[in-house]
Every structure is written in C-alpha cells, then in structure tokens.
Image (tube, grey):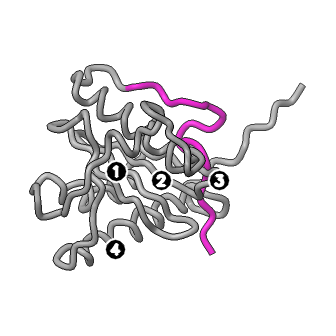
Amino acid sequence: MMVLPVGDPAMPFVEVAPVPKGLSEAARRRRALADQVCDALANPLPRKMWHGEADVVALRVMPARVGDDPAMRQPLSDAAGVVDRGGPGVLRVDSGSGGVVLRVHGPSWSLVFRVSPVVDAIVVFLDGTSRYGWRVEDDAESRELIEQAVTRVVAEAARYGLGGDKHAPPVVQVA
C-alpha cells in the first residue's frame, strides 16, 4: 500500500508554493493552466450543465498522441526524476470528488494525471503550446512509456507520504 501526500510535500502547511523567479511568460501560463486542470480533475463540475468558460478541461485540453510531437515524450520520461529531486512546487497531489490527481512541473513542461479511482486524463503541457494542454490518447506505440511514467511518478510521490523515506513529519508547536 502506498500513501500519497496531499498538497505540496516539499512545503508542508503551505497552500500554494511560490512561483520560481525568472520564468518566461509561456512557462507561467503553462504552470497556471496545469494547476487549473489539476483542480478541475480533482473537483469536476457537475455533469449535464453548461459551464461556459468555467470548464477549463473542455476548453483548454486537446486530444493528442505522444508521437504527434517529440516534445511530448520528455515529460513522460523525466517526470519521476523531477519528483525525486523535489523542490517547492514541483509535485502537487490533490484529492476531491473526482479522485486523486498528481501534477508535476518540469523545466519546460507540466504533467497532470488522475490516479484514483482509475488512471486516466493524462495531460501534458508544454511551454511551446502554453495556452493548451494535450490529453494523451490511447497510443499502442507509447503505451509502455505512459504506463511506466505514471507508475514511477506515483512511486516517487509516495516517498513523500506517510512511511516514505522523504516524509516530513508535522511540526508541533510547543508553547
């Protein structure tokens, strides 16, 4: 059994990690959109209603295959290593009525996916296309890469959870 930390495990008791200085406008847009999609997947809007601009997943996420753009392979290959190195804002684990969702920010990409109740909605964000995310469609050629990426990121995230070797126990205030 793996226990995933909810929130930013590198910054316990902080709601939102600080945005690194020196990011390009495209990187800022990409990171903000990835966080919006993470929120939307963890807490989806009710079905059978028109939500207009509020439905960020419907408006800003397009279907794509990993082979459509060579840059889409990098987040899937590098995400577990980025989580392992850690740092403020790199990993976010969110949960809500939509399940458990992980978001990883890399240097020029972000990766968001739902792991519970089932693995789905794998979305890649790239600085080059920072106004949209790319929902990874079932791709027989890249299935192994996708499965390994999800498995390795979840395993690295669990290291920050209860019982993991990177778990930061809560700080107890002594009066």
User: What residue appears at the point 26 percent right and 50 percent down from the top-left corner?
Assistant: 62
Residue 88 makes an appearance in the image = no
The amino acid type found where label 4 is placed reads Glu
**Residue 173 lies in magenta, yes or no?**
no
- Circle 1 sits on which residue? 111
Whether residue 16 sits left or right of residue 25 in the image: it is right
84 sits left or right of 69 in the view: right
Q: Which mark is residue 102?
A: 2
Where's the N terminus, which quadrant?
Answer: bottom right
- Going from N to C along the chain, the mark reached first, 4 or 1, is 1
Q: Which residue is mark 4?
A: 147
> Magenta part of the protein: which range?
1-19
The Cα atoms of the two marked residues, 4 and 1, are separated by 14 Å
Proximity of marks 1 and 2: CB atoms separated by less than 8 Å: yes
Are the residues tagged 4 and 3 within 8 Å (C-beta)? no
Label 2 sits on a secondary structure element that is strand
Residue 159 percent location from the top left of the image:
53, 61
Which secondary structure type mostly characterizes the magenta part of the structure?
A: loop
Q: Amino acid at mark 2?
A: Leu
Q: Nearer the viewer, residue 148 or 116?
A: 116
- Cβ–Cβ under 8 Å for marks 2 and 4: no
Under mark 1, the amino acid is Leu
Q: Earlier in the sequence, mark 1 or mark 3?
A: 3
SS label for mark 1: strand
| Image quadrant containing the C terminus | top right
